[in-house]
Amino acid sequence: MDLHFEEWSQRLLNNCGHYFGIPVSNEDEPQGHFNVLHSYGLDIMDIATNADRIQRTRIDVKKDDLEYIYLLKQLKGTTIASHNNKTSLIEPGDFFLLDSTQSVELFYQGNLSHFMSIHMPRKEFLDWCHWKIEIGTVCKSNHLQGKALNVAFPEDNLFDERASGKETDFLFDLARIAFFKEKEHTSVLRYSDRINRFEAIKHIIDQNITNPEMSLELLSAITKMSPRQLQRDFKDQGTTFSNILNEKRLQLAVEKLKLASVNHNKPNIAFIAFNCGFGDVSNFNRKFKNRFGCCPTDYYQNHLQ
């Protein structure tokens, strides 16, 4: 049921703490829906909104006594999240970890976004994970870990009432595996299936795309696989290391440009280039134009609202 802004924002405050919706249009217009559900022994919020954004400041953090890690699953639309010094684009089927003890901005730009939020007690969950968790990161739907989480929360039956409190540990385990902070990646050699191994390799590239020194040789050192082995795996998937690395870096640049357009902040193109792993601004501009048909500045202007 669609709710007007005042009722929707009050439900957000009552059930999630001091998080505040910022409307993009008249507050009397329908804002979306907000339903409270229960599964895996945990509270789950089913939220839809066409707000400009949801925000929580450092001051808001101090107003809440209870602390949670929120596991978000994007159902429809997109969310741009600015959290834990990272900016992430969350697309349908993706999962995201949000820490209630930190400030956050979730941007929708007035477009309908539908997602769910699983409320996991913060200390209990972090103790379970030995505090080795990547907060403010996205687990993509096409990654192995994302696929496992989507089995627990399928699109056609998100809130299975049969998932009782006894299965909370199961959900914690899935989230721990999906967002585990790995210091070494020798685990890549565990995968006997080439497709699964390739997914793990792409995940490692994801974690290193901002490193301007990232190369096939560095990937070889991290994975303990020879460059020739890696090249064979890329070739089997119809691509190359360079193609994947450039695409991931360009997509990160797009996320930063979109966030700048949301805030109407004129982007520093050189800063974006270097923070996306490009060591040369002209090289970044050339690759961006080849991929998207326009330069980064024009892309930003085209997405201003």
Image (tube, grey):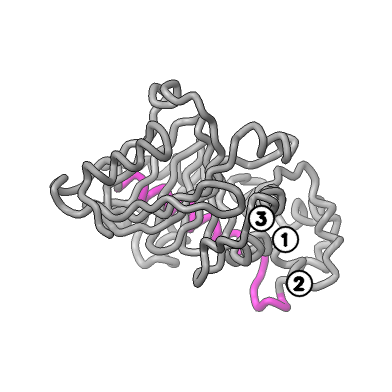
Q: Is residue 83 above or below residue 57?
A: below
Task: Look at 72% across and 34% down and name the residue there.
Answer: 127
What is the magenta segment's predominant secondary structure? helix
- List the residue tagged with mark 1: 201
Q: Are marks 3 and 1 in contact (CB under 8 Å)?
A: yes
Question: In terms of sequence position, does the residue under pointer 2 or pointer 1 come before the other?
Answer: 1
Q: Quadrant of residue 69?
A: top right
Q: Bin the neighbour count of mark 2 within 10 Å (Cα to Cα): few under 14, some 14-19, many 20 and up.
A: some
Q: Position of residue 154 (x, y in %)?
A: 55, 68
Is residue 73 visible in this depiction of the protein?
Answer: yes
- In this view, the residue in front, 187 or 257, is 187
Q: Please report whichever mark, 2 or 3, sits nearer to the chain's N-terminal start.
A: 3
Q: Quadrant of the N terminus?
A: bottom left
* Residue displayed at 85% across by 55% down: 224
Tell me the kind of residue under disc 1: Ile
Secondary element at image label 1: helix
- Rounded to the nearest whole Å, what is the CA distance between mark 3 and mark 1? 6 Å
Q: Is residue 286 magenta?
A: no
Q: What kind of residue is marked 2? A: Asp
Does the CB distance between marks 2 and 1 fall below 8 Å?
A: yes
**Side (left or right) of 194 relative to 53:** right
Residue type at numbered disc 3:
Ile
> Measuring 39% from the left and 65% from the top, which residue is drawn there?
292
**For mark 2, what is the residue?**
233
Residue 129 screen position, x and y as percent? 72, 40
Question: What is the span of residues highlighted in magenta in the rendered image?
Answer: 235-261
Q: Tag 3, which secondary structure?
A: helix
Classify 63 as above or below 174: above
Q: Looking at the image, is mark 2 or mark 1 nearer the viewer?
A: 1
Mark identifier at residue 205: 3
